[in-house]
Image (cartoon, rainbow, N blue to C red):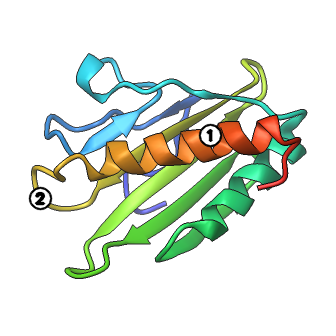
Amino acid sequence: MSNPHIGVKDGRLAACPQSPNCVSTQAEDESKQMSPLPFHGGLNETKKLVKELIHQMDRTSLEDDSENYLHVIVTSKILKFKDDVEFYFDETGQVVHFRSASRTGYSDFGVNRKRMESFSESYDRARAKGGQS
């Protein structure tokens, strides 16, 4: 991949930058931390559920779909800024790690955190219903 901030290396997504426009389940900075999502069954069931929820999100484009990884680009409605959202399916830990980061600018006014909080809530609701989103 040409962008060094995209992808999984040694079981980790890229670290968030110093700017406040990123959240990650693997962030060391508490202000950027979020909790990973527990698997819903095995890898295939979990990935299927995540993809269903991604397709329900507005202005998204699935850019990379490999065995344990998804990369999605979300485009803002008015200014057309692009954010990168990544999911790493950690089979050993049975969790889904994610990272959501703005490509440009400094502050995102909490957009990445709100997006992933909403995604996490949708994921939890779908899991409670047996995987039907």
Q: Is residue 47 left or right of residue 53?
A: right
Give the residue at mark 2.
105
Q: Mark 2, residues whose alpha carbon is within 10 Å: few (<14), some, or many (≥20)?
A: few
Label 1 Cα neighbours within 10 Å, binned few <14 / some 14-19 / many ≥20: many
Q: Is residue 128 left or right of residue 34?
A: right
Which amino acid type is marked by label 1?
Tyr
> Picture quarter containing residue 76?
bottom left
Asked whether disc 2 touches disc 1, contact meaning CB atoms under 8 Å apart, the reply is no
Q: Earlier in the sequence, mark 2 or mark 1?
A: 1
Please identify the residue farthest to the left as the structure is shown: 106
Q: Is residue 29 above or below residue 83?
A: above
Coordinates of residue 91 in the picture (x, y in percent): 78, 27
Which residue is located at x 33 percent, y 49 percent?
112
Query: At x 84% / y 46%, what residue is drawn?
Result: 131
Residue identified by numbered label 1: 88
Q: Quadrant of the C terminus?
A: bottom right
Q: Is residue 43 above or below residue 58?
A: above
Residue 126 falls left or right of residue 72: right
Residue 82: image quadrant is bottom left
The dot on residue 132 is none
SS class, disc 2: loop
Above/below status of 9 relative to 78: above
Q: What's the residue type where badge 2 is placed?
A: Gly
Q: Is residue 5 visible?
A: no
Q: Residue drawn 10% across and 51% down?
A: 106
Left or right of 20, for residue 32: right
Residue at 52% from the left image edge and 50% from the top image edge: 86
Alpha-carbon span between mark 2 and mark 1: 25 Å
Can residue 79 be seen from the camera position used here? yes
